[in-house]
Structure formats: C-alpha cells, structure tokens
Amino acid sequence: MKAMVLNKLCNLKETQTPLELMELPIPIPGEREILLKVKACGVCHTELDEIEGRTPPRQLPVVLGHQVVGTVEAVGSKTSAIKIGDRVGVAWIFSACGVCKFCLAGKENLCRDFQATGRDADGGYAEYMTVAEQFAYPIPDAFSDVEAAPLLCAGAIGYRSLCLTGLQDGQRLGLTGFGASAHLVLKMAQYRYPATDIYVFARSAEERTFAKELGAVWTGDTTERAPEKLDAIIDTTPAWMPIVEALANLESGGRLVINAIRKEGDKHSLLELDYPTHLWLEKEIKSVANITRNDVTEFLTLAAAMNMKPEVQVFALEQANEALTELKAGKIRGAKVLKID
C-alpha cells in the first residue's frame, strides 16, 4: 500500500518534505480489530507538533493522520458490531486501558495509557490502517468522506471545548484563532446557542473575513480588545501570547478554554500576566486534553442533526507535504483533507 511516512523529526522551516511516499505491507487486523480502506484523512495542526517533536511519536517511522474515514475491508475473529463494507471513522483516541479510574469514569481521555492515532500507532496518511473495533465510529450518511474527516478531530475536540466553557444561551463567546476547529465551533455555537454573539480574534485578515462570512458579530486581531467583555473564550492557537490577550477580554467569572495539545514560541509572554487585569474576579483557565469516544459519538450525532458542512480544501495523498507546509505557513480556510483513491 502507499503511505506518507515520517521517518525522522524535522523543522518545517527547513524542509517542505517531512514525509516520504513509501510502499508498505497492508496491515493485518488482530482478532478484535478491523482493516480500514482509507478514503479520506484530515490534516491537523497536531501533525506539525508531531513532526517537529513537541508531541513526538513513540517510535519512528510512523504514519501520521488521526481524522480517518474509510470502508471496512476485513474484520478480526472476535469483532461483532462492525461488518465488512461499513463506513467508519477513526479519531485521535486510538486506545485506552479501559480499567483505570479515568476509563471507568468515562474520562478515557485522561488515561495514562492513552494512545493517539497517527502518533502512537499508524494512522490514516495511507491506503489502509487497522484499529480496534470499539474505537471506530459509524459515519452518518449526511456527510461525504472528505466532509466527515475533519469532524473526527477538529469537530470533536471543538465540541468538547464548547461543552467545557459552560456557556449559556445569550452569553458572549470568543474564539481566538480561526482554523479548522474554530470554524466548526462557530457553527456549533450558532446552532446550540442562537442568542449568543460570537467574537473572533485572528492574526490573518483572511481568517477574520471568513469568520464574518460565517456570522461572527465582530472580528479583530489577536491583540485587540472586543467591544464587550466575553463570558467564555476558546483558544485554538499554538502560541502563548493569545492566552494573555484572551484573559484581558474575559468577563469576571468567565472561563478560558485552551484547545491545544502543545504551545510553542515565546513562553515569556506569560510573564506579562497582570493579576488584577487578567485573572482576578474569579476568571478560570481550563485545558482540553484529548477526546473520549463519547465526544466523537455525540458530536457526529449533533453534526448530522444540524447538517454541518465543514469548509474543506482537498489534496491527494501524495500532496500531504504540500498541505502540511501550507498549514505551517498559516494558509488556512477551514480544514485540509487528503482524499485517497
């Protein structure tokens, strides 16, 4: 099978070809696994973190990709729920132990043995992949393969982030950064909280224009002050500075939810925190860690009910390096997806 393989960590400012197109054996599913013929795989900012070593793979080489849609070609001897021919998706959560206190409480995203698709196990930048049956999800008929792919991470983690804000309809929501996840959060928030005004902060003028097109009531640069204090803000950026700026825009008793697996760049930005301005009056900071299977299932149901259609830019599998290079350069409008023929 064809696969785009990460053989070594590298700096994307120094190379535009971090992945190598290779021929690999088609994997054989274990007794509780399925073999998926991949049709589409989303391209995520987390893959930049993997390539550049901020959240490095457990071992190299590895096949990246954790927003995977495909059809089942084979099943293990002890599978039961999924059948050959089913269309299913695979998300960031590849596996968890199932027996620790977090897993038993439905918080498998916090499991110490959590494994991530495309980081700790081969993912969807390939023609085939395997996954345990219980970590695959039926894809609603409402979505094409390329539409469904970004829902499995950008959408699901955005859904978890929105839930963690504790937002009530009519309160004001801010989004800092406006890439794949944030544009889906805006759509979700409009559907779930029709009386809520949404404010978007982004460095890129193109992203701000896109946010306006989708219904944001106000847009501004990351460093600007919104005309109103915001009850909740979701930060989807990879940098530290927007945290400080977001806290300055937060209402008393408000919550900042940080939807990022890693932060890069100048950590000294946090030294600019001024307690009375940024944290006093019971402001909160909440981080988002991974997703649970329940997040994916609930979100796919919601996305189908609201007929969510993500904005996508489609690339061939062999163009994965081009998609990643554009993502690194900030050339973003919605989500980038590899279509695998």
Image (cartoon, rainbow, N blue to C red):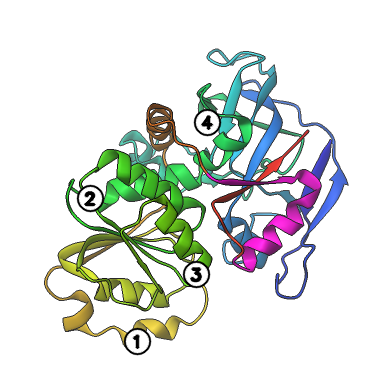
Indicate the secondary structure of the residue bearing disc 3: helix
Q: Quadrant of the C terminus?
A: top right
Cα distance in 3D space between marks 2 and 4: 34 Å
**Label 2 vs 4, first from the N-terminus:** 4
Q: Can residue 311 be seen in this view?
A: yes
Indicate the secondary structure of the residue bearing disc 4: helix
Contact between marks 4 and 1 (CB within 8 A): the answer is no
Question: In the figure, is residue 251 to the left or right of 129?
Answer: left
Residue 216 coordinates in the image, percent (x, y): 35, 56
* Image position of 293 with respect to 15: above or below: above
Q: In which quarter of the image is the N terminus?
A: top right
The residue singled out by tag 1 in the image is 271
Image: magenta residue range: 311-330
The residue singled out by tag 4 in the image is 135
**Label 3 vs 2, first from the N-terminus:** 2
Residue depth check, mark 3 versus mark 4: number of the one nearer the observer: 3
The residue singled out by tag 2 in the image is 196
Q: Can residue 113 be seen in this view?
A: no
* Image position of 138 with respect to 237: above or below: above
**Label 3 vs 4, first from the N-terminus:** 4
The residue singled out by tag 3 in the image is 205
Say what amino acid the circle numbered 2 marks.
Answer: Thr
Question: In the figure, is residue 273 to the left or right of 138?
Answer: left
Cα distance in 3D space between marks 3 and 1: 28 Å
Say what amino acid the circle numbered 4 marks.
Answer: Phe
Contact between marks 3 and 2 (CB within 8 A): the answer is no
